[in-house]
Image: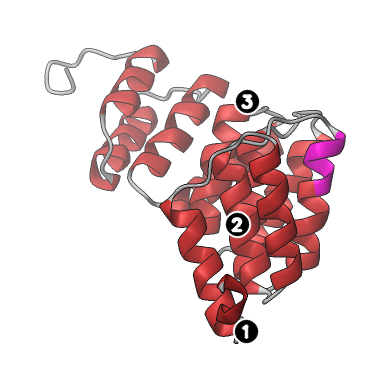
Amino acid sequence: MEGSGTRGNISTVNLLIGFFGKSDDLNTCMELIKQWDLKMNCYTYKCLLQAYLRSRDAHEAFRVYNEMRRKGYKLDIFAYNMLLDALAKNDKVDQVYRVFEDMKRKHCEPDSYTYTIMIRMTGKIGKVDESIALFDEMITKNHSLNLVVYNTMIQALANGRMLDKVILLFSKMVERDCRPNEFTYSVILNVLGATGQLGKLD
């Protein structure tokens, strides 16, 4: 297309971005935008954001997100969660907090997956009180508490060596007919061992 002198439109580039997943391919798409003198629209930015997230490039994804903010473009819950998850997995703690607060200011209500990401990250960095506050907020807002949510919260409490709270939450989990799995028991055994309380199993 480029060699023939044919000029594509932004929809063409959007399709290419959605198809490609490597940084080099995405750079080629950006070059086409410049060569064809095209203007990126909201959908272009969303495609680009998701493409960088698919390629596990959290740095570029956050850069695109900031451009979207400056232009007043909004993300949906799916895009917010993808971005939060990628940033959290790359230990970009400050950026995670910023995106989470932006999300709430933009009236995009966090869902169960959003809270799970935040609970996992805060538990990992030792801010267990924040994990508890987020979990309580989930309950207040009537979000569903599934196995993943319970396991994530139990892991956060275990990271903080809060054995009594771990046992209490485990009991509530069972009472609410949420069946523990191997991961649940592994976390509980580890925290019992770490706190010298394995005798409680007798």
CB of mark 3 within 8 Å of CB of mark 2?
A: no
The disc label shown at residue 195, or none: 1
- Residue at image point 60% right, 87% down: 196
Quick one: SS at disc 1? loop
For disc 2, the marked residue is 120
- Residue at image point 38% right, 29% down: 33
CB of mark 1 within 8 Å of CB of mark 3?
A: no
For label 3, the crowd category at 10 Å Cα-Cα, with few meaning under 14, some 14 to 19 and many 20 or more, is few
Q: CA distance from mark 3 to mark 2?
A: 21 Å
For label 1, the crowd category at 10 Å Cα-Cα, with few meaning under 14, some 14 to 19 and many 20 or more, is few
Please name which of the two marks, 2 or 1, marks the residue nearer to the observer. Answer: 1
User: Is residue 139 rendered magenta in the image?
Assistant: yes
Looking at this view, is 64 or 129 the one in front?
A: 129
- Seen as rendered, the residue at the extreme right is 140
Q: CA distance from mark 1 to mark 3?
A: 42 Å
User: Is residue 69 rendered magenta in the image?
Assistant: no
Kind of residue sitting beneath label 3: Asp
Looking at this view, is 88 or 66 the one in front?
A: 88
For disc 3, the marked residue is 76
Kind of residue sitting beneath label 1: Thr
x then y, percent, for residue 88: 55, 57
Kind of residue sitting beneath label 2: Arg
x then y, percent, for residue 139: 81, 38
Residue 122 versus residue 104 in the image, above or below: below
Residue numbers of the magenta segment: 136-140
- Residue at image point 51% right, 70% down: 189
Specify whether residue 152 is in view.
yes
Which SS type dominates the magenta stretch? helix
Figure quadrant of residue 13: top left
Please name which of the two marks, 3 or 2, marks the residue nearer to the observer. Answer: 2
